[in-house]
Image (spheres, coloured by chain):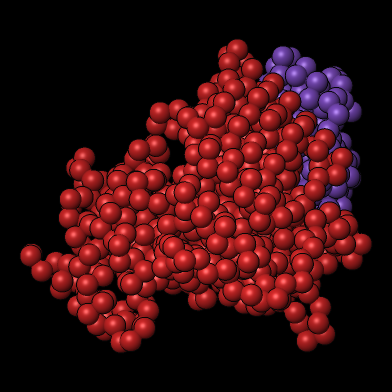
Chain colours: A purple, B red
């Protein structure tokens, strides 16, 4: 599945670490349960890893840990579920997270621009056709009343 | 009237092209029904019983003659030559073809209009008092603030996929003519003891299946802070509102489940993180928007009464008394154009009428027209001396029915005739009521009658003094009556009168209710006054006497 970052399709170094074991290599994306279970050993390994969050994730126990994640992937279970937009905005504005925020799951090319406006820095599209269309949408001249989230 | 700058124009032009592309991709099969649905809804396009329905925004109910002529053109070219004005001050076209919608949007953009977010799970048209700027009891003209909120909410990247639709209304007067208490967010403009402008913020009001009166979440939010505060409410709702059941997804359900105090805490935590950020409104920002509103140059008039005509004088006087209102400016009056003439579905206007109204507005009222929450139109700035000439023309065009505020000036949804959600028809019931009461509506006095064809409540039945709700009983159309609702001053939900009534008995039941009121009222007592004093029982007895 193609990944868009910086307005182009790029190779994806990351992979999803699906089971509950402690990952042993760099660029694994773990879920919240895995993080909470293995926090101490993950920190001591000094690996580069990312975290997947669902749109309704309770942030209260993670906000102090954000510096450990080189990437946060926010999952969209359905393209009409807008929780991920506010979560990304919170990560940028409220919690000051400055690394990669990636949109994964059910996202439409038509949503690419809005996602990047609220703080997503990479988008994981379902197929090449969608990715190319998303790039086209991102390149269009557009104007917004709302400030860009950085 | 707010005039677009180049930026505003570019934004809506871009949106037209975007939607043209989306429509073409859908027609080519590149977007599924399911994927196209939220995209078209965000542009005001529903798929209804017979055809698509396009809802066009009229921000805070303000139209120019030029814009109204364009609406007439659209009605004529793309529809069946009429339009329907809604309770949220918008207009709906019931018969456009899907393929022509991008062209309609392009026509609208030429006169600074659009259909952005007139439906879908996003922030809808911002509504306000139809008498903003001309009523004497105003704290501040709310329209520039409505425009500021319109801009902030338009194509908002974060709030375009909310759990459910989201409606905001603003009132500039202590008297609530915008139904702010039954909106997801209601804003009442206030001045604090230092004379600073701000807003009392109400949250969690709404009609529909679970009608709720909004509660005050903040007594006073200064104008500089209002956008950040709104954003904090919306973010809290977007994060925490339910998405598993569309009937439990409105903010009112979230506020009720969370409790107002806890919800307020959550909002204020969000607010604290953005309060001093990009959304702070500086005086310059507000002034820039105010400067783009055309100001009206009132003439100095002696407060002469309208010229007394010799013929028709009785009818004219009755119209003057019922359909016009005091203006804050000496020598001017507010004129309501009734869209509730006998034989016409409430809120409907033909293309020909629209063109005439546009001409009359130019001739008599600065080329501006207001749409009202009661599905009528208003010329808010007519010189008293011009009233008779204006009345003659309105009367000829069936726009001067003497019934503003009366039982035949009812709010009514399109019902089963057009809407795919409805359980029962409303337009034929409305016509029956008009026929029954057209001769004595004024004598009965002001009674608000509101009717919805299903429990989604688009006709606001819960807040009518008389509410009629269409229900389906084993494939038959029945009607549930409520009495005592209110949307002015302190909003109140009506109480159920009794079991539902068969369709052919509804008009008689309404007649019974009116007879009980007329028999029991003390002097000029209002319907609600009498109801409060004598209670529901006498009405119940009369309506259900045959049982």
The count of marks equals 0
- B184 lies left or right of B539: right
Quadrant assignment, res B16: top right
Image-based side of B536 in relation to B224, left or right? left
Q: Quadrant of the C terminus of chain B?
A: bottom left
Q: Is residue B110 visible?
A: yes
Q: B538 or B327, which is in the foreground?
A: B327
Residue B438 image-quadrant placement: bottom left
Horizontal and vertical percent position of residue B330: 69, 75
Farthest residue to the left: give it: B546
Q: What residue is rendered at 47% in x and 53% in y?
A: B395
* Residue at the (79%, 63%) spot, across then down: B297
Q: Residue at x 79, y 68 (%)?
A: B223
* Coordinates of residue B118 in the picture (x, y in percent): 60, 43
Q: Quadrant of residue B510?
A: bottom left
Q: Judge whether A96 appears above or below B203 on screen.
A: above
Q: Is residue B4 above or below residue B210?
A: above
Seen from this angle, which residue lies furthest front? B310
Residue B229 visible (yes or no): no
Q: Nearer the viewer, residue A22 or A78?
A: A78
Q: Is residue A103 left or right of residue B182?
A: right
Residue in the picture at 67% in, 42% down? B67
Horizontal arrangement in the rendering, residue B131 relative to residue A86 (left or right): left
Pinpoint residue B166: horizontal percent, then vertical percent: 59, 52
x, y percent for residue A75: 67, 36
């Amino acid at each position: 599945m193609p990944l868009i970052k910086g307005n182009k399709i790029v190779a994806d170094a990351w992979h999803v670490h699906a089971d509950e074991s402690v990952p042993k290599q760099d660029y694994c994306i773990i879920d919240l349960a895995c993080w909470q279970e293995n926090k101490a050993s993950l920190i001591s390994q000094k690996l580069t890893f990312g975290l997947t969050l669902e749109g309704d994730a309770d942030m209260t126990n993670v906000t102090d840990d954000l510096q450990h994640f080189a990437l946060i992937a926010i999952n969209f279970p359905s393209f009409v579920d807008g929780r991920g937009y506010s979560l990304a905005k919170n990560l940028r504005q409220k919690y000051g997270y400055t690394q990669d925020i990636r949109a994964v799951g059910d996202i439409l090319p038509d949503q690419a621009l809005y996602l990047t406006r609220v703080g997503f820095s990479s988008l994981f599209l379902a197929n090449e056709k969608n990715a190319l269309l998303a790039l086209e949408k991102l390149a269009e001249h557009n104007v917004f009343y709302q400030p860009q989230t950085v | 009237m707010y005039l677009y700058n180049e930026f505003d124009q570019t934004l809506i032009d871009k949106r037209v092209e975007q939607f043209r592309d989306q429509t073409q991709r859908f027609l080519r099969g590149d977007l599924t029904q399911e994927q196209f649905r939220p995209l078209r809804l965000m542009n005001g396009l529903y798929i209804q019983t017979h055809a698509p329905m396009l809802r066009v925004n009229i921000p805070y109910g303000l139209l120019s003659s030029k814009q109204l002529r364009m609406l007439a053109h659209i009605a004529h070219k793309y529809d069946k030559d009429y339009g329907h004005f809604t309770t949220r001050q918008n207009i709906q076209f019931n018969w456009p073809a899907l393929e022509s919608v991008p062209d309609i949007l392009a026509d609208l953009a030429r006169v600074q209009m659009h259909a952005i977010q007139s439906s879908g799970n996003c922030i809808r048209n911002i509504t306000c008092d139809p008498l903003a700027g001309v009523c004497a009891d105003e704290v501040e003209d709310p329209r520039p603030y409505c425009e500021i909120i319109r801009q902030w909410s338009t194509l908002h990247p974060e709030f375009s996929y909310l759990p459910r639709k989201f409606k905001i209304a603003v009132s500039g007067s202590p008297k609530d003519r915008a139904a702010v208490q039954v909106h997801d967010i209601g804003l009442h403009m206030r001045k604090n003891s230092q004379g600073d402008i701000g807003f009392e913020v109400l949250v969690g009001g709404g009609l529909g299946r679970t009608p709720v009166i909004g509660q005050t979440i903040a007594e006073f939010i200064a104008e500089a802070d209002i956008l950040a505060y709104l954003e904090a409410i919306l973010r809290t709702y977007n994060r925490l509102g339910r998405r598993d059941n569309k009937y439990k997804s409105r903010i009112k359900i979230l506020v009720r489940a969370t409790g107002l105090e806890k919800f307020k805490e959550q909002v204020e935590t969000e607010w604290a993180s953005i309060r001093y950020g990009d959304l702070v409104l500086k005086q310059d920002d507000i002034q820039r928007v105010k400067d783009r509103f055309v100001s009206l140059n009132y003439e100095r008039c002696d407060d002469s009464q309208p010229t007394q005509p010799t013929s028709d004088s009785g009818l004219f006087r009755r119209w003057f008394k019922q359909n016009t209102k005091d203006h804050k400016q000496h020598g001017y009056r507010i004129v309501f154009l009734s869209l509730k003439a006998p034989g016409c579905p409430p809120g409907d206007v033909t293309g020909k009428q629209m063109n005439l109204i546009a001409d009359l507005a130019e001739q008599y009222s600065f080329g501006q027209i207001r749409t009202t929450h009661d599905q009528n139109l208003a010329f808010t700035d007519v010189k008293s001396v011009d009233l008779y000439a204006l009345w003659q023309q309105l009367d000829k065009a069936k726009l001067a029915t003497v019934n503003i505020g009366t039982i035949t000036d009812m709010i009514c949804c399109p019902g089963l005739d057009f809407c795919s959600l409805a359980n029962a028809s409303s337009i034929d019931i409305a016509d029956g009521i008009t026929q029954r009461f057209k001769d004595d509506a004024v004598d009965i006095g002001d009674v608000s009658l509101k009717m919805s064809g299903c429990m989604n409540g688009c006709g606001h039945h819960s807040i009518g003094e008389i509410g009629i709700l269409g229900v389906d009983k084993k494939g038959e159309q029945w009607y549930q009556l409520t009495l005592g609702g209110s949307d002015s001053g302190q909003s109140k939900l009506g109480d159920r009168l009794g079991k539902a009534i068969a369709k052919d008995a509804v008009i008689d039941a309404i007649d019974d209710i009116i007879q009980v009121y007329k028999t029991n009222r003390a002097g000029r007592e209002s319907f609600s006054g009498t109801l409060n004093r004598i209670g529901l029982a006498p009405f119940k007895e009369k309506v259900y006497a045959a049982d």
